[in-house]
Amino acid sequence: MTITSTPSALVRALSDRVSGPVATPSSDRYESERSGLQRLGRHRPSLVVGATSAEDVRAAVAAAADHDLPIAVQASGHGTGVPLEGGVLITTGRLAGVRVDPDRRTAWVEAGAPWGDVVRATAAHGLAPLSGSAPGVGAVPYTLGGGVGLAARRYGFAADRVRRLEVVTVDGRVRRVDAEHDADLFWALRGGGGSFGVVTGMEIDLVPLRRIYGGSLFFDAGPDILDTWYAWTRNAPEDLTSGMTVLTLPDVPGVPEPLRGRHTTQVAAVWTGPLDRGPDAVAPLRGAAPVLRDTMRELPYAESGTVYAEPDHPHGYRSRAMLLSDLDPDAAAELLRRTGPSLPFMTVVGLRHLGGALTRGPESPNAVGHRGAAYLLNVLTVAGDADTADMAALRSGAASLFGGHTLGRSLNFSFGPLAPEEVREAFAPADFGRLTRVKADTDPGDLVRANHPVPPLV
């Protein structure tokens, strides 16, 4: 594909107006600036602005809008959806400050801060954000998509704890939105994604969570473990949030010896109740089958990224993620059969237990969809340099096994391009209609290209 040229006058003007770097395809830093963790379908912008402040973001958005150029944002680059071809890419890794107000139990989080930085800053005060399982994921984009975190059943969606947002819209305005100011935009940004402008920061409520009991149990993969986990979750208290991951681990250094080359099931869990009751809470799992590896322990929340211990090296992947009202045991067994170790490519099947506080909306309603979902199913293929037809067929077929229980899509766990009609599946029809109206009000020309795009007025 040909990268659309950018007027040299725009490059010169932005170089003079922003503090961060401005890179074009001929620049030495262009390749590193445009690349995040996701290496399949990378952005190919005409211009990259490495923002160091909200003013840098405002200048980049205003200049792009003046030239009618599309705009995309990259924080950590985990969830790149539709790659930007031409236009202006704003990278926010340099805009990554975190300020904690321990008296108010809040934190101000800038656009590019990863969850690991937020967790460390808040842990010093005995507080915690509603962070996800991967410390390297950008806190702001994760929250804009809803955010199902490590303690989600106890505390709800990350989007439910947002007090206010600072966002730059295509008219060049820096808007500070909350429940009383730009209420429609505030509603849309919390759960509706990044289609409405470029968020430069958010204020979030923190929870008093200093220590947890958690970690992972690893087993040889099989339907017995899935059945045991499913039965265990059906009566789980809200203090228990868990997920199950099934994959074949490579036989390479860096993978713990007991797991190398094996088709494994990892059950990860976080217990937020009285710490001395944590071992009893997970005890039913230990009796399901021989445990290959056990990392369950009491730990400070500052080390919560070790619960799932997900890979953080750049690679290419695609996924299909569905929200389910329930699990069909027969469908689950067939899912394991289809995604087993005989496949010629790596496949990861993930299940998250939902419910609990996730079913209850915040005091100020937001756009998070399908709160009644009981489980999240994610089928991911590691694609290397290219996504193949066989990979796409596997993801689609595996997800379709649960068709009778499917409520809609999960955006945050969807990696790869989604068409507007697919994005629509993440929301109630009335809410999606409202999102398109907010998009039309804030970005009628559809210049802001989000990972999961909401179109203006469909």
Image (tube, rainbow, N blue to C red):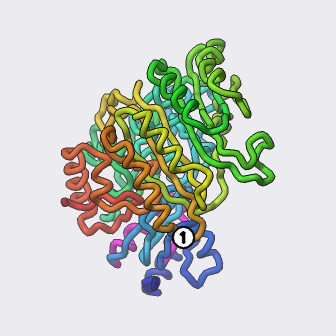
* Residue displayed at 65% across by 49% down: 248
Q: Which residue is drawn at 65% across and 45% down?
A: 263
Q: Considering the whole magenta stretch, tell me its main secondary structure.
A: helix
- Which amino acid, mark 1? Ala
- Element under label 1? loop
Q: Is residue 100 shown in magenta?
A: no
Q: What stretch is highlighted in magenta?
A: 47-67
Give the residue displayed 55% in from the left and 74% down from the top: 22
Residue 436 image offset from top left, x and y in percent: 23, 55
Q: Name the residue under label 1.
A: 386
Residue 391, compared with residue 240, is above or below; it is below
Magenta stretch contains residue 60: yes
Foreground: 138 or 339? 339
- Horizontal side, residue 173 vs residue 261: left or right: left
**Mark 1 surroundings within 10 Å by alpha-carbon count, few (fewer than 14), some (14 through 19), many (20 or more):** some
Of residues 305 and 143, the one drawn nearer to the viewer in this rendering: 305
Whether residue 216 is situated above or below residue 256 in the rendered picture = above
The quadrant holding residue 224 is top right
Which residue is depicted at the point 38% across and 57% down? 452
Residue 6 visible? The answer is: no
Q: Nearer the viewer, residue 343 or 418?
A: 343
